[in-house]
Image (cartoon, rainbow, N blue to C red):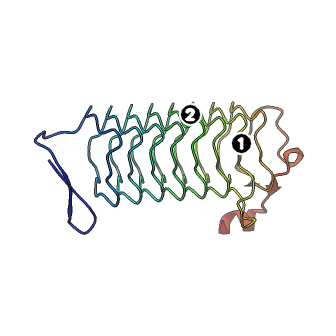
Amino acid sequence: MDILDKDGMLLLSCQAESLRGAILTAVRLPNANLEGIDLGRVNLESAFLERANLEMAILEHANFLNAALDMVNMDSAKLAHADLTGASMQGAILDDADLSSAILVGSDLYWARMFRAKLTGANLENALLQGSELGEADMRGANLRNANLGRDNLGGCTKLSGADLTGAILDGANLEGATYGSGTKFPVGFDPKGHGMYELSDNEDFGR
């Protein structure tokens, strides 16, 4: 199997027809075109995959510990139970991705797009989420203890319009300036305004 970059240049060649379960620790695949590939249970610890295209890729139970994934495209990727502990994912595209029960402890998701992402039961403890797009994300039962969902370095806000945070753990989370709408669901007893969040009007929410 050959792995090419987005311009068709060869990055990696291997004899195996599938990379499922492969050990690719510290591999360098910047700009790689891996759309739809099956990388389930692959070990990509400390790999360099910045700006790679992993749209619709199968990445369930994959190990991305401390991987460099800035600006990666994981739109609609399957990342259930993946370990992304300490991964750098600034500006990553994760719209419609399945991250259910994924481990994202201490991951850097600054400015990441996770619109309609499935994060049920995901562990985002100590994660950096400033300026991220979490509109309509399913975050039921997610662990956001001590996560930072506050303003980004330019004063921009984290967006939670329509997100479902039912049963989520928000102890110690920074939500200062994060926006929400009438469709956003919070854990029982949680006071969003008391945590410095800003409620959008229906017109503002529609315009997102």
Residue at the extreme right of the image, as rendered: 194
* 187 relative position to 89: left or right: right
Q: Is residue 189 above or below residue 138?
A: above
Foreground disc of the pair 2, 1: 2
Count of picture labels: 2
Q: Quadrant of the C terminus?
A: bottom right
Instruction: For mark 1, give the secondary structure.
Output: loop
| Residue 68, image x, y percentages | 45, 50
Look at 50% across and 34% down and name the residue there. Answer: 102
Which of the two discs, 2 and 1, labels the residue nearer the N terminus?
A: 2
| Residue 52, image x, y percentages | 36, 57
Q: Is residue 198 above or below residue 147?
A: below
* 131 relative position to 10: left or right: right
Q: Residues within 10 Å of mark 1 (few under 14, many from 20)?
A: many
Q: Nearer the viewer, residue 79 or 206?
A: 79
Marking on residue 185: 1
Q: Nearer the viewer, residue 138 or 90?
A: 90
Look at 39% across and 50% down and name the residue there. Answer: 48
Q: Quadrant of residue 199?
A: bottom right
Q: Nearer the viewer, residue 144 or 183?
A: 144
Q: Is residue 88 above or below residue 157?
A: above
Looking at the rendered structure, the kind of residue marked 1 is Lys
Residue at the extreme left of the image, as rendered: 15
Q: Residues within 10 Å of mark 2 (few under 14, many from 20)?
A: many
| Residue 91, image x, y percentages | 53, 59
Q: Are marks 2 and 1 in contact (CB under 8 Å)?
A: no
Q: Which residue is mark 2?
A: 122
| Residue 92, image x, y percentages | 49, 56
* 165 relative position to 65: left or right: right
Looking at the rendered structure, the kind of residue marked 2 is Ala
Cα separation between marks 2 and 1: 17 Å
Instruction: For mark 2, give the secondary structure.
Output: loop
